[in-house]
Amino acid sequence: MGTVTIDRAEYDRLIEAAAELEDLRAYDRAIARLEAGEDDLIPAEYVARILAGEHPLRIYRELRSYTQQQLADASGVNRVQIADIEGRRKNGSIETMKRLAAALNLAIDDLV
């Protein structure tokens, strides 16, 4: 193998092109996850509520158009317990959060 010398401008252009290609690949992976149902988009107003300190359980429950009772029925978790978790009065156990996440079609990491 030999050595190839290119000028700095060409090197910088190649580095920029490689970064753009990685961005395109990341975009394609994200679109594929959305199309496969492995991921979903969260509207900005919901993200802002999470960042403002509102419990993610409430945000995702509302995003999925569930009432607390509907989520309770789907998850087997008591409605009052859901209200306490959403209000940050109590923390749910790992098992409870797993059941809630499953009912909302989420990873537990999305709720904790």
Image (cartoon, rainbow, N blue to C red):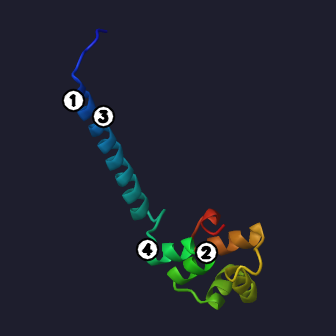
Who comes first in sequence, dot 4 or dot 3? 3
Determine the image quadrant of residue 59: bottom right
Amino acid tagged 1: Ala
Quadrant in which residue 71 is drawn = bottom right
Q: Secondary structure at mark 4?
A: helix
User: Label for residue 53?
Assistant: 2
The residues tagged by marks 4 and 3 sit, at their Cα atoms, a distance apart of: 32 Å
Q: Residue at x 78, y 70 (%)?
A: 93
What residue did someone put label 1 on?
Answer: 9
User: In the shown orientation, is residue 36 left or right of residue 95?
Assistant: left
> Which of pointers 3 and 1 lies earlier in the amino acid sequence?
1
Q: Tag 2: residue type?
A: Gly
Amino acid on which the number 4 mark rests in the picture? Ala
Cα distance between the residues tagged 4 and 2: 14 Å
Do residues under tags 3 and 2 come within 8 Å of each other at their CB atoms? Answer: no
Q: Which residue bears the numbered disc 3?
A: 15
Q: Looking at the picture, tell me which residue is in the foreground, 106 or 73.
A: 106
Please identify the quadrant where the C terminus is shown.
Answer: bottom right
In the image, what residue occupies the spot 61% across and 74% down? 53
Q: Are marks 3 and 1 in contact (CB under 8 Å)?
A: no
Mark 2: secondary structure = loop
Q: Which mark is residue 44?
A: 4
Q: Quadrant of residue 76?
A: bottom right
